[in-house]
Every structure is written in C-alpha cells, then in structure tokens.
Amino acid sequence: MHPLIQRLFDDYGYAEVSHQTHADFIGQSGFTVLFFAGDPKRFRDTTDVAVVLPELVKAFNGGLTAGVVTSDAEKELQRHYGFSAWPALVFLRDGGYLGAITEIQNWNEYLQTINTLMSAEVTRPPGFKVPVVNG
C-alpha cells in the first residue's frame, strides 16, 4: 500500500471499508465519504487526493467521516456508485447517496461541490451504465 494511503489509517484513523463493512460504514448517521484510491501507479491523482482528503475532513469541522475502500471491494462498489474516473470521493448522508467527485480538483471546487452535495437530496446511486449503440 502506498505510504500516503497508509497514513490515512495510521495518522487519521480512517475506516477500512470492505465488502463486509460497507453497509455499516455508510449506515452511520451524518455525512460520510468513501475514498476510492485505485492503483496509485496507474492513477497519479490518487496520492494528491490522499493528501487533500484529511484537509477536507478538517474543513468541515468533523461533520464528514472518511473511509477508504479496500482494493478488493473497489470494482464492485464502483459499479454500484457509477463513477467512471479514478480516484473518486463518494459522498453519502445517513447511508443515502449524494454524489461523487472524481480526480483531483482545486480547493475551491472541492468546497463548493461538497457544500452543494451536503445540502442536496439523497438519490439512488447511478450505478454502472453501459452505452447502447444502435446500428
């Protein structure tokens, strides 16, 4: 595991979210964020998001609980939440889906998007979509 991702567990105490713990983690009351890191060698933004995530949690004064999705659960949960770019932060409230932010963003975009998501209505996750080609 990359040291910047390991730091999220060691220094910040973020939960490791697996297939077995996913429902309990997102079922907490309040706002949660799932970090889908992917392979840092393949997705260079992963380490940047790993550094930014604790700062985002701090910016929301403890109103956001973060968890890191285990590599063995990422693909299945990615299909469930329907994002297509890595890394991703998936936001939920009381277990209900609010939206996702993918790849690295600038600080103001993070704050604006997260504030918008936190005041949004819960929706169904979009799930994985396969484009249909007629012809």
Image (cartoon, rainbow, N blue to C red):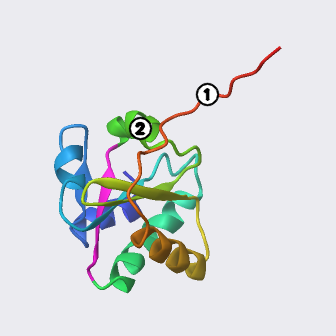
Which residue corresponds to mark 2?
80
The residue at the far top in this view is: 135
User: Which x, y percent locates residue 6?
Assistant: 32, 60
Q: Quadrant of residue 84?
A: top right
Q: Bounds of the magenta span? A: 62-70
Q: Which residue is at the front of the view, 103 or 83?
A: 83
Give the residue type that dot 1 points to: Val
Give the total number of marks visible in the rendering. Answer: 2
Q: SS for tag 2?
A: helix
- Sequence-first disc among 1 and 2: 2
Q: Which residue is at the front of the view, 1 or 105?
A: 105
What residue is shown at x 61% (from left), y 76% (from top)?
106
Q: Are marks 1 and 2 in contact (CB under 8 Å)?
A: no
What residue is shown at x 53% (from left), y 67% (from top)?
48
- From what the image shows, is residue 91 above or below residue 74? below
Give the residue type that dot 2 points to: His
Which residue corresponds to mark 1?
130
User: Which x, y percent locates residue 59?
Assistant: 39, 85
Q: Is residue 98 left or right of residue 112?
A: left
Q: Is residue 33 left or right of residue 43?
A: left
- From what the image shows, is residue 129 above or below residue 9? above
Q: Which residue is at the front of the view, 106 or 64?
A: 64
Q: Is residue 131 magenta?
A: no
Secondary structure that dominates the magenta span = strand
